[in-house]
């Protein structure tokens, strides 16, 4: 009986998590349009629903009713599976995110001992959806877009993982909960400031967020790896990119801003609310970056990843290791 109850609880948590993440991404998209409109002296969506709040729902309905076209030369099975793989890998990262202290019902879906490694493994699998999507359509522009996206994701994953090694050394654990609990007194933003800069920047590149939105550069690739996708299959790729952007804010909050731990001693506010406040702050920074920086040239994108971010992450790692070995 206990096994069945545990299984039922996991299914309920999984459903609530999937629905919550999808709704969070819809809210992210709505506010992105509103904030971008504010930055550009426009109003953003206002026609669908009060204040335009139903615009994301209208977008989903539009994509659901668009004709689903599969190119004649495409591999039908891989063509259909690619957006699903990409989306579920982006969604899977949330399984190990600690939303609240250990022991509470909604703390997280799971608490593996090596939560950081599980998160990195799930995130790394997302590259298969992008690579296979561009290849399956048998289109030169789609293939070029998938190759560029794959090279970019692999390059910046190295810098991102190297920056997290500093956090792991500082904490002495690869558990997500241990990393958050270690930040009760001092958040990792201060002792791991270099790692924070590298991780946040690399996570933006992983999400193909401005100024790293090279996989779909319209001027040279038409639409990148999803050039031949339409309807809800394109919608899944787009939803995946937005989910990756939200993941960037969520993971940065977890590793560097203390997660669910309160700031300024305000313990009367629940940890879950603190978590959302910090994520909202970083999401606003995402909007700000999108409105401020132009797109990189691709060769400079790769140079920045390999010759700037990776050495800085290595420097942070060496400095952290020396400090932990001598003084911690």
Image (spheres, rainbow, N blue to C red):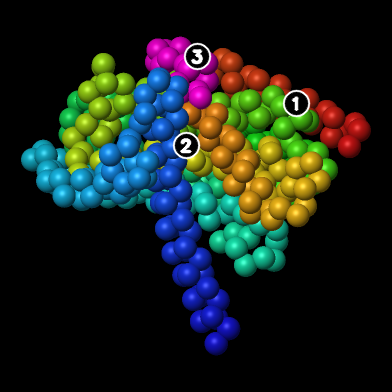
Q: Is residue 29 left or right of residue 312?
A: left
Q: Residue 102 is drawn in which quadrant? A: bottom right
- Could you say whether the residue bearing mark 2 is in a helix, strand or loop? helix
Q: Determine the main secondary structure of the stretch shown in magenta.
A: helix
Q: Nearer the viewer, mark 1 or mark 2?
A: 2
Q: What percent of the width, then of the height, locates residue 154?
A: 47, 31
Q: Helix or strand or loop: what does disc 1 sit on? A: helix
The answer to whether residue 161 is above or below residue 70 is above
Residue position for label 1: 318
10 Å crowding of disc 2: few (<14), some (14-19), many (20+): many
N-term-proximal mark, 1 vs 2: 2
43 on left or right of 65 = right
Q: Is residue 73 magenta?
A: no
Q: Which residue is mark 2?
A: 245
Residue 47: image x %, image y %?
A: 28, 39
Please give the label number shown on residue 303: 3
x, y percent for residue 237:
32, 41
Q: Nearer the viewer, residue 276 or 17?
A: 276
Q: Residues within 10 Å of mark 1 (few under 14, many from 20)?
A: some
- Side (left or right) of 146 relative to 166: left
What is the residue that sits farthest to the right in this orientation? 327
Query: Could you give the CA–CA distance between mark 1 and mark 2, rounded to whole angstroms?
Result: 29 Å
Q: Furthest-front residue in view?
A: 50
Q: Quadrant of the N terminus?
A: bottom right
What span is colored magenta in the figure? 288-305
Can you tell which of label 3 and label 2 is closer to the viewer? 2
Considering the numbered disc 3 on the image, is that residue within a helix, a strand or a loop?
A: helix
């Amino acid at each position: 009986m206990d096994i069945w109850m545990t299984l039922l609880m996991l299914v309920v948590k999984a459903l609530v998590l999937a629905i919550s993440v999808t709704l969070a991404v819809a809210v992210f998209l709505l506010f992105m349009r509103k904030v971008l409109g504010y930055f550009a002296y426009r109003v953003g969506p206002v026609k669908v629903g009060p204040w335009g709040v139903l615009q994301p729902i209208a977008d989903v309905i539009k994509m659901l009713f668009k004709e689903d076209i599969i190119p004649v030369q495409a591999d039908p099975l891989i063509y259909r599976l690619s957006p699903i793989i990409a989306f579920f890998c982006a969604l899977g990262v949330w399984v190990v995110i600690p939303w609240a202290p250990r022991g509470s019902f909604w703390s997280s879906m799971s608490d593996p001992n090596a939560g950081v490694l599980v998160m990195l493994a799930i995130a790394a699998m997302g590259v298969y959806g992008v690579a296979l999507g561009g290849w399956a359509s048998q289109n030169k522009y789609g293939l070029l877009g998938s190759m560029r996206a794959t090279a970019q994701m692999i390059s910046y994953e190295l810098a991102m993982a190297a920056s997290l090694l500093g956090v792991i050394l500082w904490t002495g654990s690869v558990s997500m909960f241990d990393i958050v609990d270690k930040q009760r007194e001092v958040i990792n933003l201060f002792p791991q400031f270099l790692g924070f800069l590298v991780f946040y920047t690399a996570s933006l590149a992983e999400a193909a967020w401005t100024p790293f939105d090279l996989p779909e550069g319209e001027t040279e690739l038409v639409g990148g790896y999803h050039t031949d996708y339409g309807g809800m299959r394109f919608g899944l790729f787009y939803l995946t990119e937005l989910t990756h952007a939200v993941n960037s804010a969520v993971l940065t909050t977890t590793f560097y801003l203390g997660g669910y731990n309160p700031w300024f001693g305000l313990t009367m506010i629940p940890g879950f609310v603190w978590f959302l406040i910090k994520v909202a702050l970083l999401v606003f920074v995402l909007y700000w970056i999108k409105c401020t920086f132009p797109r990189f040239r691709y060769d400079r994108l790769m140079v920045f990843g390999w010759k700037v971010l990776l050495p800085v992450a290595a420097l942070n790692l060496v400095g952290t290791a020396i400090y932990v070995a001598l003084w911690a």
